[in-house]
Amino acid sequence: MDTMSKFYDLSVKFILFIVVILSVSACGSDAAETPAVAPTESPQATAITAPTASPVTVATPTSTQNTASQPKVNDILVILTQATGLERFAALLENAGLTDRLQGAGPFTVFVPPTVAWDELPPAILADPELMREILLNHIVEGDARMTDLGKTGKATNLRGDELTVLVGEEGATIQGSNVLVADFEANNGVLHVIDTVILPQEIAAEVMALYPAVVGEQTYPMQGNIHIAHSATSPVAYNSIPPTSGPHYSDIVAWQVYEEPFRYEQLVHNLEDGGVMLYYQCEAACPERIEQLRTIAQPYIDAGRHVAVVPNEPTWILADESTPHQDMSTPIAVVAWRKLLKLDEFDTEKIRQFIEAYEGIDHHVK
């Protein structure tokens, strides 16, 4: 079975979103709310298994009546308005003056973050109408782009003119780092894909991330997804921080302990997804004192079964194929959790412990 076939051959274990699509007869809408041409088939959606996560799906309407009375597919905006968990996106589109466009003939492809994803944005961003309009346009593509086609092309150009990177693995897919939860939900003027995080335009991503609250001065980074890749493979996208805080990674983790030999970033990112905190150290020469300092902090957590490990960052490490799997992290110590990075110019027991207590043990698998 090829990768894309595996991608769609998935069992459904639970429902995250329930989308109720109402026809004219079912909801009492007037004719203006329903485009003139509607498909005769029932709406379809594909559940996407995010890496190491339970798959989710969208429930379509059911009826005990004959097929002639089955609800018909509505346009994108009506679907969003009636979808439990997606209402915020519809409201934001209205506030931004984009509703008329999505009620048009289309077709359009819309990447839809759920309400909980919008709630995670800093309030200052949500309160900026011009900025929100740009962010919303980042989620809309002209044309009917099904996940199979997106996986083949590896990209999609949104209404801002930006190119979004699409990655498809054996157990999931990402759109510009956002995990796809539900793919190919049909509307009569396009298709919707439900994703787990808001896609930020690249030129404002750092500005937005800087507004996230910090515990001890750490930086938050945009999500790069949870895609699994083959062992020994290099991440298909460049990590947005060194060391990385999320992104494509191998399917297993390293044991929670203190190491003096390096591992590839692609291995260690999975430890972060599992709720881990990695204490990276970088030395120009042997540095037993620094390792011992970090061991002193980490070992009690490790002995207690907590998810903490100490690992070296080796920018001079060269593989047999002459590639360099690590890059200079420009600091002697870096404390890393999922999407969180604290760089330290000197050893600081209090800050490291505060970081561990704040972020260790939080599972980041797609729910």
Image (cartoon, rainbow, N blue to C red):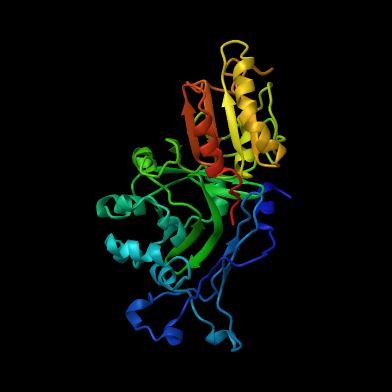
Q: Tell which of 14 and 229 is nearer to you.
A: 14
Q: Estimate the x, y position of residue 31 in percent, counting from the top left.
A: 35, 82
Position of residue 324 in the picture relative to residue 155 (left or right): right
Q: Quadrant of residue 91?
A: bottom left
The residue lying at 50 percent from left, 23 percent from top is 329
What residue is drawn where x is 40% and y is 44%? Answer: 213
Give residue 338's position: percent from left, percent from top: 54, 41
Quadrant occupied by the C terminus: bottom right
User: As drawn, which residue projects farthest toward the bottom?
Assistant: 65
Q: Residue at x 52, y 76 (%)?
A: 40
Instruction: Indicate left or right for 71 with 309 as reference.
Output: left
Instruction: Note whether residue 317 is visible.
Output: no
x then y, percent, for residue 260: 68, 21
Which residue is pictured at 42% across the width and 35% down the height?
Answer: 217
Q: State how many labels appear.
A: 0
Along the viewing direction, whichever of 261 and 74 lies nearer the viewer: 261
Tell me, yes or no, if residue 52 can be seen here: yes
Locate residue 259: give its quadrant: top right
